Amino acid sequence: MIQIRPVTHLRNKFPEIEKAVKGGRPVYLTNNGYGVMVVMSLEQYAKLTEDTELQLDEADRAAADSDVRYTHEEVFSRLRDGAHR
């Protein structure tokens, strides 16, 4: 079940939020009725970012092995072209 709580609970009811995220459930925090952040366990975060970290490491190795560099215009142009296909 999704847990949505006011951001003040982060300060006032931290043990409850900590228990929820340790149980594998992210907690969505709101401020004045609007979502502002999600709190999750380090394990959940690691699962979400693991592939990205590996891909960034691979890109760093490829960049170190090559002298080819692209401007941000070239990169975003290629991304836009790929998105329109």
Image (cartoon, rainbow, N blue to C red):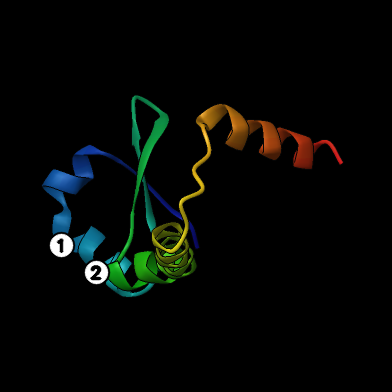
x, y (%) of residue 83?
A: 77, 40
Q: Would you name the residue on which mark 1 appears?
A: 15
x, y (%) of residue 2?
A: 48, 57
Q: Is residue 70 above or below residue 73?
A: below
Q: Nearer the viewer, residue 22 or 71?
A: 71
The reply to whether the C-beta atoms of the residues labelled 1 and 2 are less than 8 Å apart is yes
Amino acid identity at mark 1: Pro
Q: Is residue 66 above or below residue 44?
A: above
Q: Quadrant of residue 25?
A: bottom left
Q: Would you name the residue on which mark 2 appears?
A: 19
Q: Quadrant of residue 23?
A: bottom left
Give the residue displayed 87% in from the left and 41% down from the top.
85
As drawn, which residue projects farthest toward the front? 67
On screen, residue 21 versus residue 70, left or right, reads: left
Q: Is residue 4 above or below residue 32?
A: below
On screen, residue 84 versus residue 60, left or right, reads: right
Give the residue displayed 50% in from the left and 63% down from the top.
1
Q: Nearer the viewer, residue 4 or 36?
A: 36
x, y (%) of residue 5?
A: 34, 45
SS for callout 2: helix
Q: CA distance from mark 1 to mark 2?
A: 6 Å
Give the residue displayed 46% in from the left and 51% down from the top.
67
Amino acid identity at mark 2: Lys
Q: Nearer the viewer, residue 64 or 10?
A: 64
Which class describes the residues within 10 Å of circle 1: few (<14), some (14-19), or many (20+)? few
Q: Is residue 70 above or below residue 26?
A: above
SS for callout 1: helix
Which class describes the residues within 10 Å of circle 2: few (<14), some (14-19), or many (20+)? few
Give the residue displayed 59% in from the left and 37% down from the top.
75
Total tally of numbered discs in the picture: 2
Q: Which mark is residue 29?
A: none
